[in-house]
Amino acid sequence: MERYIVKGGRPLEGEVEISGAKNAALPILAAAIMTDETVVIENLPDVKDINVLIDAISKLGATVVREGRHRVKISGKTINSVCADNEYIKKMRASYYLLGALLGKYKKAEVSMPGGCNLGTRAIDQHIKGFTLLGADVNIEYGKIIAQTKELKGNHVFFDTVSVGATINIMLAAALAKGMTILENVAKEPHIVDVANMLNSMGANIKGAGTDVIRIKGVEKLHGTEYSVIPDQIEAGTFMCAAAVTRGNILVKNVIPKHLEAISAKLYEIGCSVEEYDDAVRVIGNTKLSGTQIKTLPYPGFPTDMQPQMTVTLATAGGISTVIESIFDNRFKYVDELTLMGAKIKVEGNVAVVEGVEMLKGAQVNALDLRAGAALVLAGLGADGFTVVEDIHFIQRGYEDFPLKLTKLGATIAVVNDEKEIQKFKFKTA
Ligand code: EPZ
């Protein structure tokens, strides 16, 4: 089993180039099959979840040509199945975007119940509510969601909770519904806007993405396009925290600084220097950081996907910090792992109280999910001694070349397979 070994205690310095946003690229790939014409997608991150979805799309019968690591050409003309239920797709959350895309185009879709990182309850009632309001019959049978209708009709959908997935999914289906759909209480994340822009470049008529109300005037059909995915806000934030945790100096390049404002503001507040450029952000982690309060919220609030990385940052900041997780009901499981590294954190329900310690200490820890895994790597980089992070397949789902990018910043990190390789790494880097 692959794992990372990290030798910590060294400030990370230099420049890092951010890849395309996974959570924008996933629905964009699904949208690509909504036309019979060719769609070219650029700036795709080369990560496991993206590759699995591309594979699932080709299994539906679409013609998929990988034109390099970050570019794919897709033609939905050859699709001969509306059923996506292979083994890995079941473990992915974003598989549900195939429901919106297939239902919009073919008026029928069968997709395995979505999996994804275990962050607590991850309901899909708002997706079902939206599809039903557009006129689809939605049933769950043998672990599959089956949605079908003769005709999708625009409607007024007021979401009961702000959901990234449901907002995007209903937007996908409504793009090809008859008449006007109005979505209210929607998510406003940068990837919502990116998906709307991509659909509009295919001939959809979507207005208001990024605001509280999205208006979609259904069109008869969509056409081909060439589209480049936005940079990954969370990968960028992770490297910004890496500068803070290791007291380093990192220029995070190829970003949209506006998308990072909630993260930049918190890092500045705790004592980091943060410089914003047109498409880059520099973070300098000063030696003395102070604690703060964080509450995760839908965009433009502080992103839940940055909560573990920020908690690790606060684990060695002075004083007491509180972190409130308000999006997911069980996103603090990694705290037990951090405690093994000497962090002083108490969790009560959805609140973590962090008492900053001088320094973390290396340990053997498990990456329990994607962002928690990345956060533990950051903890290892800032810690004294060696840290082994197990279950790195979670991290590989969403971070392209994570160890390589860190190595270029001066980190001492390697992928190892067994105890012998761990000992060799320790010997070489001692
Ligand atoms: C997306 O998940 C992201 N995943 C998550 O990123 C991210 O944490 C999350 O949005 C919040 O920003 C992808 O884009 C693939 P939600 P999603 O629907 O769409 C509740 C990562 O690390 N809810 O906005 O599943 C739900 O239980 C991943 O990259 C309902 O109650 O999130 C949760 O409490 C992890 N009913 C809250 O809403 C529904 O029908 C937000 O979920 C849908 C959601």
Image (tube, rainbow, N blue to C red):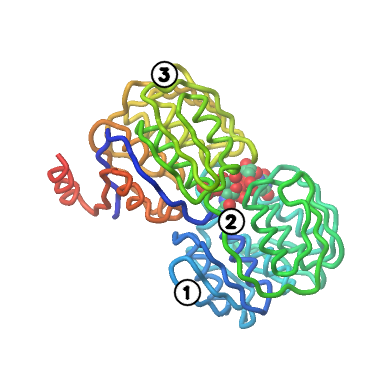
Marks counted in the figure total 3
Instruction: Please state which amino acid type lies under the numbered disc 3.
Output: Gly
Q: Which residue is mark 1?
A: 67
**Residue at the image point whose x is 47% and y is 65% from the top:** 70
Q: Earlier in the sequence, mark 1 or mark 3?
A: 1
Q: Which residue is mark 3?
A: 318
Mark number displayed over residue 268? none
Residues at marks 3 and 2 touching, judged by CB atoms closer than 8 Å: no
Instruction: Please state which amino acid type lies under the numbered disc 1.
Output: Glu
**Residue at the image point whose x is 40% and y is 48% from the top:** 16
Other-residue count near label 3 (Cα within 10 Å), few / some / many at <14 / 14–19 / ≥20: some
- Disc 3 from disc 2: Cα separation: 36 Å
**Residue at the image point whose x is 43% and y is 52% from the top:** 17
Q: Is residue 357 visible?
A: yes
Q: Nearer the viewer, residue 282 or 189?
A: 282
Q: Which residue is mark 2?
A: 24
